[in-house]
Image (cartoon, coloured by chain):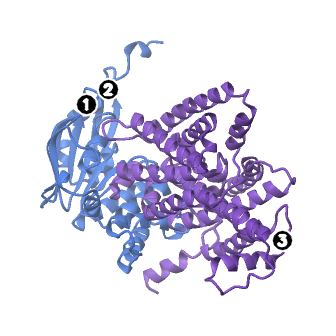
Chain colours: A blue, B purple
Amino acid sequence: MSVALASRGVSITRGGRAILDDITAAIPSGALTAIVGPNGSGKSTLLRVLAGLWRPSRGSVSLEGTPLERMARREIARRLAFLPQDTRCDFAFTVAELVAMGRHPHRGRFESEQDRDRRAIESAIVVCGLDHLRTRTVDRLSGGERRRVAIARCLAAEPHVVLLDEPTAHLDLEHALTVLELCRALAESGCAVVVATHDLSAISRAATRVIVLSEGRVVANGSPDEVLTAQVCRDVFAVEAEIVSTSSGQPAFVFTKHTEVPRGLASERLVP
Amino acid sequence: MTPVAVSARRAASVHGRIPPMAFYAVILPLLAIAATAGVVIGSTPLKWSTVVQVLACKMLPNGWADPSGLTRADEAIVWLIRMPRVIVAAVVGAGLATAGVVMQSLFRNPLAEPGLTGVGPGAVLGAVVVFVTGWSTASVVALPLTAIVSAFMALFLVYGIATCGGATPMTTLLLTGIAVGAFLTAISSLLLSLNVVAWQVAQEIVFWMMGGLDSRTWAHVWLSAPFVAIGLVAALLQSSKLDLLLLGEESAAALGVDVEAAKRLLVVTSALLTGASVAVAGMVGFVGLIVPHAVRLLLGPGHRTLLPATALAGSTFLIACDLAARTARPPAEIRLGVVTALCGAPFFLVLLLRRFREVHE
């Protein structure tokens, strides 16, 4: 598998605090890479740096061999799609209009929609199960439907790399599974897919590789079997985990509360 | 049927929206009627034929139209008084409405208005200084030119304060605009209160603050129209970026927009439109708020359709409001800003409630 996206020694410092510290990671094409870690571990920041939205304080990121700082914003957008956590839109665009915006990097200022654009938009709408909603305005959609529209917008760009920040947030079980299956199918089609998520059970079944972040550092990087262990859950997430095998032979996580006081909670608050 | 054909067929109707062609089929005749009425109707009654004859004599090549029967007074009323007034109203209406669209998209808030970045209060302060110093009597262009220059000075001050490390967060820009705007308004009020004894000056300032198009000449047309035209073209060229900015800065950047450069260009575009409009018409409120909102409810938020439609609707609205301002209680004129607020606020509420009920029922 070729490396689609690579970070070398990436660090980010904001307000004197290191948010990311010396992150070196390679994102391969044709694989679904999951980034997991507790809140505040730097998952979203890493995705922003990988997407070229934030410039690292140290280190560099290269997309298909070219450093991002040498690429124009539009050129990056043609090859890499990024779904941020906040995809709120208070203006009443229709589903079809929102998905069509994904073609922006491919279209010139005065260029009208071509057949290729329409096919990409149509395909993204159908793949994300939005066919029956295409003329509905965004203010009439549920949170999960809005999330699927945002994912469809990313897919309409026909990118080589897709970075999704918590794509299954706000989705019901069926649609969450559908999105993960979609990510897996995208990866199998040759795309490099990166997903930041908290859902360890789902990702242990769907992901090809897992990067575990803690306090801005990579603490584990490898296949789900190697990385998602009870020890990592204890050390990184401060929970006890029992990893059981389902009837289909897939792993499932059962979590129990850690015996120690979780990080970030002051002990006096726990005293009645 | 191919996917593309299916897509086109299904995209045909969107609940609550009307087709753009239907909008133009209504707004263009309305604009023509409003403009014609604006020239024909006034304190001195004129025949339609006289108006057409004067316009033909002035606009067609020499000898094409017959000037017989026209008096100097007819020519002066039509060509020197009412025509420039109607054109200034059209230009200012288009300018303020378009600036409103740009600001609402930049701030991702349908309640944003053109003067939010300190441009309005800056123009007011410039105008107040001109009135207080007496420069307004020196030249007809002294007031609008000073207002435009001071509007841009206020914008650069606000943008400079709100920018840190090459980035300008919109929330910081909004709050800085409000703070600087309040400060500039306080200085204007101070100058006004210090000059209340000079009743003539104080009256001019108050009237200017309430907006109005009385005594506007062709000089005002040439002072505002080029700036507004440049602003309209600049906004149209940025229409796809305006669409993407409504998704949020992060999403827009991920889709290939250089967000900081786009914001700078759009803020300057909005200031150009607002500054040129306020400079020749004073403070005319509500146009930049209600017209974009009303047109967006009818046509949707896509800027390629919204921007030209809003400009036309803004022109029509302001010509009609100005006509009402000068004919409602002759020979006195009601200030234009008062009329726009009286007409605009209830209209805005009706549209807002209609939309709210559609979403929640």
Q: Quadrant of residue A199?
A: top left
Q: Mark 1 belongs to which amino acid? A: Arg
Residue B2 at x, y = what percent? Answer: 43, 85
**Amino acid carrying mark 3 in the image:** Leu
The residue labelled by disc 3 is B46
Give the class, few, some or many, for how many residues have Cα within 10 Å of label 1's Cα (few <14, many ≥20).
some
* In this picture, residue B299 sits left or right of residue B33: left
SS state under label 1? helix
Q: Residue at x 57, y 52 (%)?
A: B100
Nearest the eye: A198 or A55: A55
Give the spatial CA distance, label 3 vs label 1.
89 Å
For the residue pair B18 and A214, the one nearer the viewer reads as: B18
Percent x, y of residue B19: 62, 74
Taking B295 as reference, is A45 above or below it? above
Pick the quarter of the image with the C terminus of chain B: bottom right
| Image coordinates for residue A69, horizontal then vertical, percent | 19, 51
Residue drawn at x 40%, y 63% as measured from the top left: A152
Foreground residue among A221 and B317: B317
For the residues tagged 2 and 3, is the chain the same?
no
> Which residue position holds label 2?
A258
Lateral position of residue B249 relative to residue B53, left or right? left
Q: Nearer the viewer, mark 2 or mark 3?
A: 3
Residue at which label 1 appears: A234
Can the viewer see residue A37? yes
| Discs 3/1, front | 3
- Compared to B307, does B110 lie above or below? above
Three-letter code, disc 2: His
Does residue B113 appear anywhere in the picture?
no
Q: Are marks 2 and 1 in contact (CB under 8 Å)?
A: yes
Marks 2,3: beta carbons within 8 A: no
